[in-house]
Image (tube, helix red, strand yellow):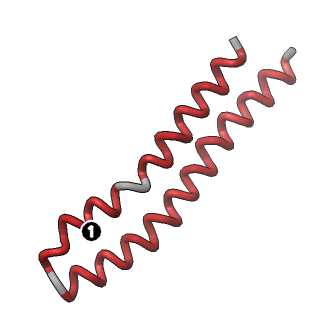
């Protein structure tokens, strides 16, 4: 029974960790492109900001999955 709890904890940690790494990689690419676009045209600030924030939903999905995984332990 204790091994099951440990595996559930590892699964929840992986759900958040992998989604956070994926978000960081996406935001790195989008942020660099947005800064380059804003350097040429300042009116693109709003669009660049929105496009930079969108990948954060990946971490929220990872958090939801982790909560669901932990809920299975109960």
Mark 1 secondary-structure assignment: helix
> Residue 27 vs residue 48: left or right?
right
Q: Report how many numbered discs are placed on residues in the image.
A: 1
| Mark 1 Cα-neighbour bin, 10 Å: few <14, some 14–19, many ≥20 | some
- The answer to whether 33 is drawn above or below residue 60 in the figure is below
Give x and y (percent) for residue 57: 43, 47
Give x and y (percent) for residue 21: 57, 57
Place residue 45 in its image quadrant.
bottom left
Give x and y (percent) for residue 15: 64, 41
Place residue 27 in its image quadrant.
bottom left
Image quarter of the C terminus = top right
Residues 61 and 7: in front is 61
> Residue 20 vs residue 3: left or right?
left
- The answer to whether 6 is drawn above or below residue 50 in the figure is above
Give x and y (percent) for residue 12: 66, 34
Q: Residue furthest top?
A: 74
Place residue 53 in its image quadrant.
bottom left
Disc 1 designates what residue?
Answer: 48
Image quarter of the N terminus = top right
- The answer to whether 17 is drawn above or below residue 13 in the figure is below
Residue sitting at x 86%, y 23%: 3
Q: Residue furthest left?
A: 43
- The answer to whether 59 is drawn above or below residue 28 in the figure is above
> Residue 38 vs residue 51: left or right?
left
Residue sitting at x 56%, y 58%: 22
Residue sitting at x 12%, y 75%: 43
């Amino acid at each position: 029974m204790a091994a099951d709890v440990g595996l559930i904890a590892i699964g929840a940690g992986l759900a958040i960790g992998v989604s956070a790494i994926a978000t960081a990689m996406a935001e790195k690419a989008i942020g660099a492109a947005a800064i380059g676009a804003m350097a040429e045209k300042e009116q693109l600030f709003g669009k660049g900001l929105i496009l930079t924030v969108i990948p954060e939903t990946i971490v929220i999905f990872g958090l939801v999955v982790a909560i669901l995984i932990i809920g299975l332990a109960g």
